[in-house]
Amino acid sequence: MKGVHPLVEQAFRRGSQTYFNTAVFFPRAIRRDVFLLYGFVRTADNFVDAIPQDAPGFYSFRRRYEAARSSGGLAGDPIIDAFLDVSRRRGFAAAWTDAFLDAMEADLTKRRYETLDELLGYMHGSAEVIGLCMAAIMGLAPEAGQAAAMLGRAMQYLNFIRDIEEDNALGRTYLPLAGSGLADLKAATARAKPDAFAAFVRAQVELYRQWQTQAEAGFGWIPWRSRVPVMTASRMYDWTAAVIHRNPFIVYQQKVKPSKPRITAELFRNAFRAFGCRRPGTPA
């Protein structure tokens, strides 16, 4: 993308097909800042998700960011400096980035979440604050913040469901298993207790849908041009959720992702649907 360092675009493109392919439809100024945000968060995530994990790389990245933020200067790193630029211009709260980096740091050592409350604490930093950053980039009213954070939460929760097998390889279990009858989410365990596993996954999909519904109630706060890509990403997550709900065991067979043609077709449909979103609190 013009005006975006190739390393920033590369980090974003490799990180998420759905986000990248929908983000290109934001208005130009917003699109650029979305790229700068996601280049930063995907880079930090890559350090902790590498096999083996690159803890020294992550801590160096965090120290350079914090030093540049404190000094008001630059880090000499195109990804960090691009993020500092958008953060300062769009008024990101420093606490948002701190919470995000704390969540990424937790991924270096924490392997399992036992309760939903514990996981929600993690997701505040890893996902909800990204929704708040996106709301700031789009210039939304403060009242839109709760829906924006909820959208980040819902989408990440579905990622946890979709990525069960990937997280197994990393030795992580994000989804709390209390009351499920499952000791873990390994494929062998799921196949030994197929009914329990299917019921568990479908219950998690329903929780995603509850949060997603709350998030979508706030779409009316988003200007039309930006609403189209946000709605499209949301619809693609709904599509992914439906695929997994029909066949929970698919998470062991493939990483469920919408194709680029499906995303593009949905973008065009949402160009019309987006007109129907009303701002919360306005009469029908």
Image (cartoon, helix red, strand yellow):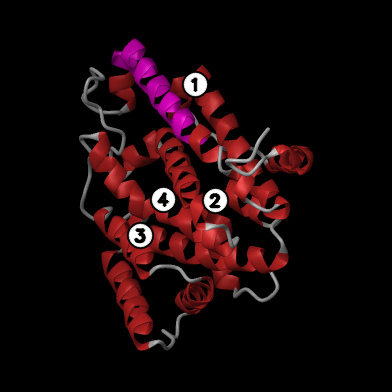
Provide the residue designation for mark 2: 16
Is residue 174 visible in the rendered image? The answer is yes
Q: Earlier in the sequence, mark 1 or mark 4?
A: 4
74 horizontally vs 102: left or right: right
**Mark 2 and mark 3 residues within 8 Å of each other at the beta carbon:** no
Residue occupying the point 46% across, 66% down: 40
Asked whether 197 falls inside the magenta stretch, the response is yes
Figure quadrant of residue 48: bottom left
Residue 281 image position (x, y, % from top left): 58, 40
Provide the residue designation for mark 3: 100
Residue range in magenta is 191-212
Compute the Cα span from label 4 to label 2.
Answer: 14 Å
Figure quadrant of residue 234: top right
133 horizontally vs 54: left or right: right
Question: Of tags 4 and 2, which is closer to the observer?
Answer: 4
Provide the residue designation for mark 1: 245
Q: Earlier in the sequence, mark 2 or mark 1?
A: 2
Figure quadrant of residue 231: top right
Q: Earlier in the sequence, mark 3 or mark 1?
A: 3
Asked if residue 90 is positioned above or below residue 81 in the image, the reply reads above
223 horizontally vs 116: left or right: right
Residue 189 image position (x, y, % from top left): 28, 21
Question: Of tags 3 and 1, which is closer to the observer?
Answer: 3
Residue 247 image position (x, y, % from top left): 49, 19
> Callout 2: 10 Å neighbours few (<14), some, many (20+)?
few
Q: Earlier in the sequence, mark 4 or mark 2?
A: 2
Q: Earlier in the sequence, mark 4 or mark 3?
A: 3
Provide the residue designation for mark 4: 127
Q: Report the quarter where the N terminus lies.
A: bottom right
> Could you say whether the residue bearing mark 4 is in a helix, strand or loop?
helix
